[in-house]
């Protein structure tokens, strides 16, 4: 849930947040040392809650009208794609040149977002499932770099919203479950055979000899926004009389626990692949879920360690992977 409230000064807003932090024993406190240069915003983290203090500037009416006009106008050259075929959707996501600089990728250029996963969430889930389950064949026409760029586009919510229909209770749970389970096939069919036998968490600088697929393999569960939404607790979801609700938040998912379990199962199965890059990616994801599921994550990693390392690891890569697994067990990953 997002709420907002107006204050007379930065100090008053900070004092309000400090009061919430202390009275509710929120835990961790972090505050940006300086306001953001471009916007003047100040960010504060209080436990798991985030606060943004933004200066209010009244727009002249003509400026507001110009802004509305600009937002409503279609981007030059943009064309809405609706009800396109599966093959055309695959081309939309993968058939693009790969620039040297990530910031120059097609997905970041104004006017290229012509497909909305929200137009038909069930169709989006169906297309993702079909792609994941048959990834080796569907993606064989593209280079490794194109596959890495396309997969990152699909799973990273800073690039597209394709993952959000998987958290939509309006899409039947069996279809969502099948799609999440199918993510394992991408690791098995595409990433395990092609990724370089390298550990990205140990790299201190970019190495052009590493397959570009290693990046999406390592970051899959970091950038993927999938998360079960069981609904907030009373201590998390409340609105004060002085606050205004901006966004009530996502719809509660009755299958939130099952969704989390399916993600953990995909990660557990991925640890069984004979690919050190896939193992690292699964451990990375498990580390990010350790705070929510410490017992389940601990059991999965313990089973992995006992199976793979009955004795002391042989070789530097396995020593580093074992150390990373122990760190992930505690949630100490980035």
Image (tube, rainbow, N blue to C red):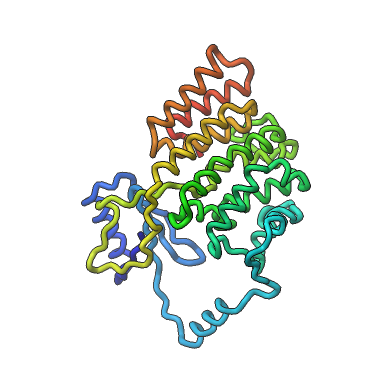
Query: How many marks on residues?
Result: 0
Q: Is residue 47 visible?
A: yes
In terms of depth relative to the viewer, which is nearer, 55 or 305? Answer: 305
Where's residue 177, x and y in %? 50, 44
Quarter of the image with the N terminus in it: bottom left
Q: Is residue 228 above or below residue 165?
A: above
Q: Based on the displayed image, in which of its 4 quarters is residue 43 positioned?
A: bottom left
- Seen at 54% across and 44% down, the residue is 178
Where's residue 109, x and y in %? 66, 64
Most extreme residue toward the top is 311
Q: Based on the displayed image, in which of its 4 quarters is residue 103 positioned?
A: bottom right
In terms of depth relative to the viewer, which is nearer, 97 or 201? Answer: 97
- Seen at 37% across and 49% down, the residue is 254
Q: Is residue 165 above or below residue 136?
A: below
Q: Is residue 48 left or right of residue 157?
A: left
- Seen at 64% across and 60% down, the residue is 108
In terms of depth relative to the viewer, which is nearer, 259 or 174? Answer: 174
Q: Is residue 104 visible?
A: no
Q: Is residue 116 left or right of residue 150?
A: left
Where's residue 67, x and y in %? 53, 80
Most extreme residue toward the bottom is 62
In terms of depth relative to the viewer, which is nearer, 24 or 258? Answer: 258
Q: Based on the displayed image, in which of its 4 quarters is residue 215 positioned?
A: top right
């Amino acid at each position: 849930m997002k709420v907002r409230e107006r204050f007379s000064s930065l100090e008053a807003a900070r004092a309000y947040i400090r009061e919430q932090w202390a009275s509710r024993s929120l835990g961790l406190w972090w505050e940006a040392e300086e306001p953001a240069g471009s916007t003047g915003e100040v960010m504060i983290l209080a436990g798991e809650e985030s606060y943004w203090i933004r200066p209010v500037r009244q727009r002249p009416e003509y400026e507001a009208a110009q802004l509305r006009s600009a937002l409503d106008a279609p981007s030059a050259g943009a064309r809405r794609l609706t009800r396109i075929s599966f093959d055309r959707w695959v081309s939309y996501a993968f058939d693009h040149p790969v620039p040297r600089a990530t910031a120059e990728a097609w997905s970041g250029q104004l006017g290229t977002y012509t497909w909305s996963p929200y137009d038909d969430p069930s169709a989006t889930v169906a297309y993702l499932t079909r792609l994941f389950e048959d990834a080796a064949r569907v993606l064989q026409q593209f280079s490794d770099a194109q596959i890495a760029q396309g997969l990152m586009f699909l799973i990273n919510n800073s690039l597209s919203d394709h993952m959000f229909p998987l958290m939509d209770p309006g899409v039947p749970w069996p279809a969502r479950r099948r799609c999440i389970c199918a993510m394992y096939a991408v690791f098995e069919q595409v990433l395990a055979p092609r990724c370089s036998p390298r550990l990205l968490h140990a790299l201190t600088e970019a190495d052009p000899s590493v397959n570009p697929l290693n990046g999406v393999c390592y970051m899959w569960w970091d950038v993927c926004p999938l998360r079960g939404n069981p609904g907030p607790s009373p201590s998390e979801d409340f609105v004060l009389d002085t606050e205004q609700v901006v966004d009530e938040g996502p719809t509660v998912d009755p299958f939130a626990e099952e969704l989390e379990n399916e993600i953990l199962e995909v990660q557990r199965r991925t640890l069984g692949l004979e690919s050190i890059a896939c193992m690292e990616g699964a451990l990375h994801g498990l580390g990010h879920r350790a705070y929510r599921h410490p017992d389940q994550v601990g059991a999965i990693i313990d089973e992995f360690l006992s199976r793979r390392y009955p004795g002391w690891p042989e070789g530097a890569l396995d020593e580093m992977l074992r150390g990373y697994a122990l760190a992930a067990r505690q949630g100490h990953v980035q």
